[in-house]
Image (cartoon, rainbow, N blue to C red):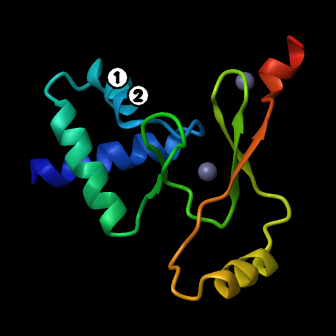
Amino acid sequence: MRYSKERELIYEALWASKEHPTADYLYNMLKAAHPSLSMGTVYRNLGVLVKSGKVAQLRMPDGPDRYDADLRPHYHAVCKVCGSVIDVFSEYSTELDAIIKKIEPDSSSYCLTLHRLCGECQKHC
Ligand SMILES: [Zn+2]
Ligand SMILES: [Zn+2]
């Protein structure tokens, strides 16, 4: 019982966050209100959520994996300065999907990361 409750908690925190948190970040976010939660529990439940297809795992080129509960097709842009991950919902290209499939018919998925400045960092430029 407790196990699935924790998973629910982790999922909801992920859903509420638009920041694509890492496991560490999620743990730090939750531990104040849920002191019994352990780092291992967060990792384990994230693994289960990814495996069951409820959560997307984003492999970052330089840094720990991040997680996204929003499964609508979208791209991610990483800020070149602060490293924050931004959702890009406009212009999702199924044509690009088809091209990738042509390049590698055996591929099951691909990961495209765009690089830009986030709104916050743009202000300081
Ligand atoms: Zn930034
Ligand atoms: Zn996203």
- The image shows residue 82 at horizontal and vertical percentages of 66, 21
Name the kind of residue labelled 2 in the image: Tyr
Q: Is residue 87 left or right of residue 110?
A: right
For image coordinates 86% across by 11% down, the residue present is 124
Placement of 40 over or under 48, stated as above or below: above
Placement of 51 over or under 31, stated as above or below: below
Q: Is residue 113 left or right of residue 19?
A: right
Q: Is residue 19 left or right of residue 87?
A: left
- Outermost residue on the front side: it is 103
Identify the mark at residue 72; answer none if there is no mark: none
Name the kind of residue labelled 1 in the image: Asn
Asked whether disc 1 touches disc 2, contact meaning CB atoms under 8 Å apart, the reply is yes
For image coordinates 65% across by 84% down, the residue present is 101
Give the Cα distance between marks 1 and 2. Answer: 5 Å
- Residue 118, image quadrant: top right
For image coordinates 43% across by 58% down, the residue present is 55
Residue denoted by label 1: 28
- The image shows residue 36 at horizontal and vertical percentages of 13, 27
Q: Is residue 77 left or right of residue 22?
A: right
- The image shows residue 90 at horizontal and vertical percentages of 84, 59
Question: Front-most of 13 and 82?
Answer: 82
Q: Give the class, few, some or many, for how many residues have Cα within 10 Å of label 1's Cα (few <14, many ≥20).
A: some
For image coordinates 79% across by 19% down, the residue present is 121
Q: Give the class, few, some or many, for how many residues have Cα within 10 Å of label 2's Cα (few <14, many ≥20).
A: few
- Outermost residue on the left side: it is 1
Quadrant into which the C terminus falls: top right
Question: Front-most of 118 and 28?
Answer: 118
- Residue 77, image quadrant: top right
- The image shows residue 44 at horizontal and vertical percentages of 20, 48
Secondary structure beneath label 1: helix
Residue denoted by label 2: 25
Secondary structure beneath label 2: helix
